[in-house]
Amino acid sequence: MSFLLLSAGAGWADEPAAAPAAAPAGTPKSVEDGVRERVAKKIPGKVNSVKKLPFGMFEVVIDSEIVYVDENADYLLTGHLYDTRTQEDLTSKRSEEVLRVDFSSLPLQLAFKIVRGDGSRPVAIFEDPNCPYCKRLEHDIRTLDNTTIYVFLYPILSDDSVSKSNQVWCSKDPASAWAKLMLDGQLPEKAAEGCKTPINDVLALGHRLNVVGTPTLVFADGRRAPGMIPLDRVEQMMNSAAARPQAQQN
């Protein structure tokens, strides 16, 4: 988000305050539509939604980030918005909605599967083989029981990440090769010539879902956890998701 704001900041400096644009004759335009147009001109990224808030500001979702602007998009606020009456973090609640993924729509054939115990608690993880936080997560979650882990190889850090991902996928046992690589630093054999991998499809999937870093976990109820989270939090979210699953178990 800081990059987004830095990119936008220079453009705002010389731009005069804009009056709300008039809609073309015969074409009714909502206030939200006008805000969407002005935000799109001033801030890089895809404007996914605009919502008027009770106190005159507008919530704008850009890519997967939530910001707040005035009607002219002359002023922008980032950070967390709280309802002091209920002590509720409104931004966190809304962010969970924005980041939610329909687990049942994930193309699980693009991932390899690790099943432990009865496999009753599914989770999908986007990981880069050179990501140190992914290695820490792999070390922690090896103790998880009764789970099915879908690993989406998501090599966004370097060309070497792509090479290692291809090697893992093309191994006779990708799950075993992945564990040896992430836990022991043992490289799999080079991918056989002609071995086809889904890496490009996974990268496209991650782009559509706005997966901007690794690891990123997606739970069965659609909630997403970007970044490294403690094992007890993983357990908590998996149990919560299992109680109200959105996914069809595979």
Image: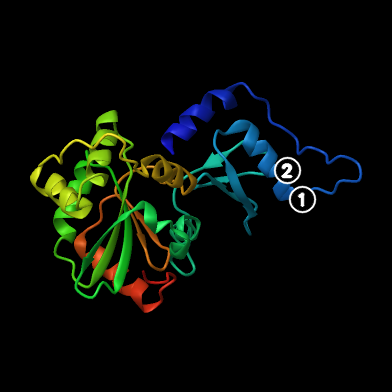
Amino acid of disc 1: Ser
Secondary structure at numbered mark 2: helix
Q: Nearer the viewer, residue 186 or 15?
A: 186
Q: Position of residue 205 (x, y in %)?
A: 45, 47
Q: Residue at x 58, y 24 (%)?
A: 11
Amino acid of disc 2: Gly
Q: Which residue is mark 1?
A: 30
Q: Is residue 36 visible?
A: yes
* CA neighbours of label 2 inside 10 A, class few (<14), some (14 to 19), many (20+): some
**Left of 141 or right of it: where is 7?**
right
Q: Residue at x 76, y 39 (%)?
A: 20
* Quadrant of image for the N terminus: top left
Query: Quarter of the image holding residue 39?
Result: top right
In the displayed image of the protein, which residue is found farthest to the bottom? 243
Secondary structure at numbered mark 1: loop
Q: Position of residue 43 (x, y in %)?
A: 57, 34
* CA neighbours of label 1 inside 10 A, class few (<14), some (14 to 19), many (20+): few
Q: Which residue is mark 2?
A: 34
Q: Nearer the viewer, residue 11 or 44?
A: 44
Q: Position of residue 168 (x, y in %)?
A: 22, 44
**Left of 151 or right of it: where is 6?**
right
**Left of 235 or right of it: where is 206?**
right
Mark 2 and mark 1 in contact (Cβ < 8 Å)?
yes
